[in-house]
Image (spheres, rainbow, N blue to C red):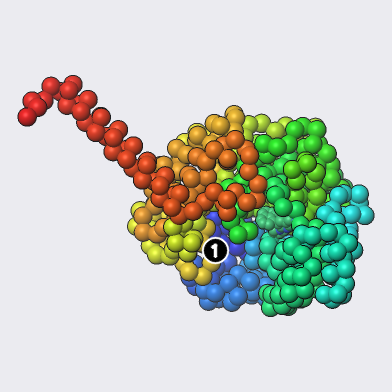
């Protein structure tokens, strides 16, 4: 493998380019007209413009990306996350053109992309799934029959959904049909596919996902879990590894289940098996993500494994060079996704110029960042600025490093979610580990954030005053 096309932008594009460089592999960046000045274009060895700013006309255009791959004569394409990363047709085109797709085979992506088929596959492999319909339901009548059988509340999901879109909860038979038809209509509009299935609704689950790696020689390993329970409207906010709720025994059991899932779909590469985890410590398969995830750095911190390097080695046919037993979880890592959004204005995207942009650095801090001072935050894409990742020997230490790092992260010109992140890390429920997927809804409000920020400002003013008075004393300045 001598040249890789990176079919992405932002921080993940930089992350992949660095891994390629370390392995002595050349890189080709692709970019939209809005990204001409961006860091991912500057860092790559070569770059090709693939279209106008909108994703639909650039980063989502498999045909244009394939043309760039042919022109520059690359050996492989790394899709990153989002965009074409879970597009089975694109992976299939790569296969047909003899370009390595750095990810699983197209059949695997297709199978796991159909959420009902994924459930069936996983269940056959002996991994627990949430009680629900056997495959998709024909219509609202059949769906209601299933709902009555498994008992309310139930959740209605789209077979082509995932990540929370096209989902509806029904609490009783009276509201069921309306919710079902609304969800179906939304799914038709969003995915062009209104095929639905039904599951028992778990009320207060935690979201725990396992990282797996599988090579082309049949070896499959898991790299422990990430707890991604803190999210806001299906958008992850904070991720950590390991989870406070698992012990070694349960970690081994869930890890084994994740490996079974990977085996059941002939997985190759890096993947993630998502589970819901309930109050009775039961776990259930939710979905499999057939890509590198945004939050992969927390796993890298606690295992010492470079996941992008492993993806590349696996794609070029190497066997994984370590065993399950070699993998030891050490310390604790936290990730905060920093978005250009205003937490006081319902997380409205905030675009503009980064008038000031100073990122924190130091022991136990990793910044996966895509921006520099003076750059514009474009309106066309996901507003994530960076991932702030911290490490400590203990969870408490990782949190302390995180809070200091947030304080040393200076952004002016656009609003960010940094203060919201600090709110999470300072919250008793988060610190005690007693939280679930409803954390943000339960505890966050703009007023709570304002209150905390004001309290901190008062404290800072008091400290400054005290310092001033001390200094005055020591300097023996005349007091008038
Ligand atoms: C669920 C659920 C409760 N019960 N399924 C949301 C995203 C999509 N991947 C699946 N999701 C859920 N499915 C059953 N049977 C609750 C959620 C859910 C959730 C899951 C993980 C992380 C955050 C979440 C927030 C709200 C709902």
Query: Does ligand 1 reach within 8 Å of label 1's beta carbon?
Result: no
96 in relation to 412, above or below: below
Q: Where is residue 250 in the image (x, y as percent from the top left)?
A: 79, 36
275 in relation to 324, above or below: below
Name the one closer to the observer, 342 or 71.
342
Q: What element carries label 1?
A: loop
Side (left or right) of 385 relative to 291: left
Q: Which residue lies furthest to the front in this view?
A: 174
Name the one closer to the observer, 194 or 6.
194
Side (left or right) of 362 relative to 264: left
Q: How crowded is mark 1: few (under 14 residues within 10 Å), some or many (20 or more)?
A: few
Q: Can residue 39 be seen in this view?
A: no
* Quarter of the render that holds ligand 1: bottom right
Q: Position of residue 361 (x, y in %)?
A: 46, 40
Residue holding disc 1: 382
Q: Quadrant of the N terminus?
A: bottom right
Side (left or right) of 83 relative to 143: left
Q: Which residue is drawn at 40% across and 59% down?
A: 414
């Amino acid at each position: 493998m001598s040249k890789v096309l990176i079919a992405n932008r932002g921080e993940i594009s930089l992350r992949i380019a660095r891994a390629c460089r370390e392995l002595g592999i050349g890189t080709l960046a692709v970019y939209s007209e809005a990204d001409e000045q961006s860091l991912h274009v500057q860092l790559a060895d070569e770059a090709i413009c693939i279209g106008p700013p909108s994703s639909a006309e650039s980063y989502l255009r498999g045909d244009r990306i394939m043309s760039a791959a042919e022109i520059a004569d690359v050996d492989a394409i790394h899709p990153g996350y989002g965009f074409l990363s879970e597009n089975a047709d694109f992976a299939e085109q790569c296969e047909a053109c003899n370009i390595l797709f750095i990810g699983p085979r197209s059949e695997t992506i297709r199978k796991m992309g159909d959420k009902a088929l994924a459930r069936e596959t996983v269940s056959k492999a002996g991994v627990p799934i949430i009680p629900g319909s056997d495959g998709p339901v024909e219509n609202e009548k059949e769906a209601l029959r299933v709902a009555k059988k498994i008992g309310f509340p139930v959740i209605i999901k789209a077979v082509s959904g995932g990540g929370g879109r096209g989902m509806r909860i029904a609490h009783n038979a009276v509201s069921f049909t309306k919710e079902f038809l609304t969800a179906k209509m939304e799914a038709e509009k969003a995915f062009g596919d209104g095929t639905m299935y039904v599951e028992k609704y778990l009320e207060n689950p935690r979201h725990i996902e396992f990282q797996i790696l599988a090579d082309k020689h049949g070896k499959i390993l898991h790299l422990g879990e990430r707890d991604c329970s803190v999210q806001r409207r299906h958008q992850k906010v904070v991720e950590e590894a390991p989870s406070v709720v698992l012990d070694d025994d349960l970690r081994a059991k869930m890890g084994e289940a994740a490996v079974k899932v990977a085996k059941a779909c002939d997985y190759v590469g890096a993947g993630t098996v998502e589970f819901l985890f309930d109050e009775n410590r039961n776990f259930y398969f939710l979905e499999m993500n057939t890509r590198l995830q945004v939050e992969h750095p927390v796993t890298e911190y606690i295992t010492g494994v470079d996941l992008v390097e492993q993806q590349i080695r696996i794609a070029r046919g190497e066997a994984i060079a370590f065993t399950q037993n070699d993998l030891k979880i050490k310390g604790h890592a936290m990730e905060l996704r920093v978005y250009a959004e205003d937490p006081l204005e319902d997380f409205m995207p905030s675009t503009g110029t980064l008038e000031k942009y100073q990122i924190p650095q130091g022991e136990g801090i990793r910044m996966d960042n895509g921006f520099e001072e003076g750059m514009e935050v474009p309106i066309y894409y996901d507003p994530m600025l960076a991932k702030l990742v911290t490490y400590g020997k203990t969870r408490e230490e990782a949190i302390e490093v995180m809070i200091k790092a947030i304080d040393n992260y200076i952004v002016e010109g656009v609003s960010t979610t940094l203060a919201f992140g600090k709110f999470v890390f300072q919250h008793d429920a988060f610190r005690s580990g007693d939280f679930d997927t409803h954390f943000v809804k339960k505890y966050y409000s703009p007023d709570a954030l304002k209150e905390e920020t004001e309290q901190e400002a008062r404290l800072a003013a008091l400290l400054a005053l005290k310092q001033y008075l001390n200094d005055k004393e020591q300097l023996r300045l005349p007091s008038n």
